[in-house]
Amino acid sequence: MSKKLVTGNHAAGYALSTAGEANRNARGAVCGIYPITPQTEIVEYVAKFPFTKGRVIPVESEHSAMGVSIGASISGARAFTASSSNGLAYMVENIMVAGYYRLPIVMVAVNRTLGPPWNIWADQSDTLMLRDFPWIQLYCETNQEVLDTTLLAFRLAEDRRILLPALVCLDAFIVSHTQMGTDLPEQELVDRFLPVLDLPHRLRCDKPATMGGLVWPQEAMSQRLEIDEAMERVPGVLEECRTAFAEVFGREVTGAVETFGVEDAETVLIASSTIATTAREVIRNRRAVGEKIGLLKIKMYRPFPEAEIRAACRTAKKIAVLDRNYAAGIGGIFWWDVRAALQDCSPSPLVQGYLTGLCGGDVTPSVIDQVIGDITSRHRATKPIWMAIEAGKEKSR
Amino acid sequence: MNSTSTVETSSVPVNPTIACSEDCLLRPGNTNCGGCGMSVGLNMLDRILEETGQQCMLAIPACCGIVTAGGFPTSSYGVPVIATTFASAPAVASGMAGVCEINNESEQIICWAGDGGTYDIGLGTLSAAAERNENILYICYDNEIYGNTGGQRSSATPLGARTTTTPEGKTERKKDILSILAAHRIPYAATLSIGHPEDFARKLRTALSLRGLRFLLMHSPCPTGWKSEPAESAQLVRLAVAAGLFPLYEIWDGCTYRVNVEPAWIDPREYYRQQKRFRIDDIDVEAVQRECKENFQRLKILAQQFPHRS
């Protein structure tokens, strides 16, 4: 195993391309691509990749990038794309279609602020706006996690028990443009990990079917129920995929959640993506001096890992949820869902939301310290607290 | 050149012995309105595909054409169909065609779309697929309204036509979509009329024999929206050709032209009168006629200067 210094975007492009190449002995790989900062290097990587049996179609919009991938996937090819921010917003209609057609498309999304204002830095509100669609959502911390999770996502999405598209998310610039030592597995290993795709409902002339015609309420609702059942199977199949991943690649890939020191924690911080990285370091130092504090990283946001969250918060009296995202009129999106997941716990822990690092702001160890200071001295929860906002408010007056 | 000064009953153009079976493209018992041009077009497509021994898959955006399929679990289509979002048929078809290409498969990937999905919401997607010259046959059945939603104006609606969103009659002319597509230098672009079935069949054969993006614009009567007599649909669109309102012509590679039917220059009122969507008093018929003649003259000059030699 040799590590190379590559960016998160490079890692994502590598994973998408080698996954596509791994389907060369079946119906190949076809995808639609369209640039948007800060994911452009991903689709550039894919465009340069010498596929044995593949076609990369540079289209005129994100909407069509997903359209092409839908056409490719329903024809039995391995299909994927990448996007970000307003690009995802423009793509929404076809994102929804890919899910309801049960197409195992994998999309890498670099989390970037939705405009306006024009801001290209990290913010998860873009992919979280897709939270109610039938897509698996996975949030990554490091370049290696991006690469591994992308490969994992194909196996999970294409599993006959699942057949749902998957979104692999990473923070703009902090991961997308930062070089880290990353193991780039040989094609042969990727081939071993990813079986060729055999889509059960692919369009074929010898068995004509109409996809997406009129369906009456009962049957249409049962299609929704089937999606719900597939979503429920995700955690179990994810674990199987992780085991297979470890066998092939000789390393672990994170599952639905990752915990650090929660076993005896009275206070648990909940975070995702790179905020989890910083929080872990702060918590490591505090635990070293005896503080009963832990970290719960939520890696899989959809389906929402309610059972894992409840288990991780078993001993917690106080829970701080850090959100680099914002739902207008609600607050942090993870916070809202965590509260719902824990609402009937007895005794019920205090759950406080903190909005931090929105629109690309730095979430430094001192911000994490402030959160810990606040949650430690707090006796009841309030509406979400906007962290480190004073300087910005001053300037915009 | 044919003269279309009189309305005549069209003969069936090709192999009339092919019986309609469950294997056909558009199955019997579908829910299309009587006199719908799309039904004729789909049957014609089926016959020419069978004649040329080809198979197809359809990508159909939101339009009457997807309602045609009927209710799950049955379908009126005997070929594989995928419903796409309104603007996405050419994008989805690009993905399908890409997979066919890398697997050396010869199925025709066909977009079957209405004028709303072609002239309006899907134009950007279609333009992009045309610019990439994807291996797609794109057929627009142009009924000059958003028929599926009850008859609103589109940019294909002709001047003067009353729709639910132009209650006083449309004040703008119909968009020249064929010129837009030809400007992409696609291998083949042509207009079709169900009132001229031999010409229709020949153009389908031509389109099916070529690779790349081929665009066919079919004037497709909609008795429900046009408020016309269903049994007269074929004769009605024949009048549009005879009046010069819907010229029949072909363009290869955006460069060489052929005009197929010389209009008889009947009074456009003959066409307007048979449809309640038009009120002749609202329309400056002389101006319309003048413009049709100028347009046809331009096409003829192009066809003389840049003739297609096959």
Image (spheres, coloured by chain):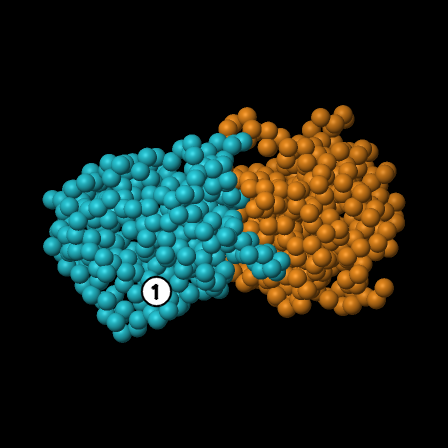
Chain colours: A orange, B cyan
Location of residue A196 in the rendering, given as x and y in whole percent from the top left corner: 72, 52
Seen in the image, is A348 located left or right of residue B167? right
Image point 82% across, 34% down: which residue?
A315
Location of residue A101 in the rendering, given as x and y in whole percent from the top left corner: 58, 42
Location of residue A110 in the rendering, given as x and y in whole percent from the top left corner: 63, 56
Extreme residue toward the front, this view: B17
The chain to which mark 1 is attached is: B
User: Closest to the observer: B169 or A326?
Assistant: B169
Image point 18% across, 45% down: which residue?
B272
User: Closest to the observer: B69 or B27?
Assistant: B27
Location of residue B166 in the rendering, given as x and y in whole percent from the top left corner: 24, 43
Seen in the image, is A178 located left or right of residue B203? right
The answer to whether any part of residue A183 appears in the image is yes
Residue B263: name its quadrant: bottom left
Image point 34% across, 65% down: which residue?
B251
The relative height of residue B285 versus residue A21 in the rendered view (above or below) is: above
Q: Amino acid at mark 1?
A: Ile
Image point 66% across, 42% down: which residue?
A200
User: Closest to the observer: A205 or A70?
Assistant: A205
User: Closest to the observer: A198 or A352?
Assistant: A198
The answer to whether any part of residue A377 appears in the image is no
Q: How many marks?
A: 1
- Dividing the image into 4 quarters, which one contains the N terminus of chain A? bottom right
Crowdedness near tag 1: few (<14), some (14–19) or many (≥20) residues, C-alpha within 10 Å: many
SS for dot 1: strand
Seen in the image, is B161 located left or right of residue A159? left
The relative height of residue A314 versus residue B169 in the rendered view (above or below) is: above
Read off the residue under disc 1.
Answer: B251
The relative height of residue B270 versus residue A23 in the rendered view (above or below) is: above
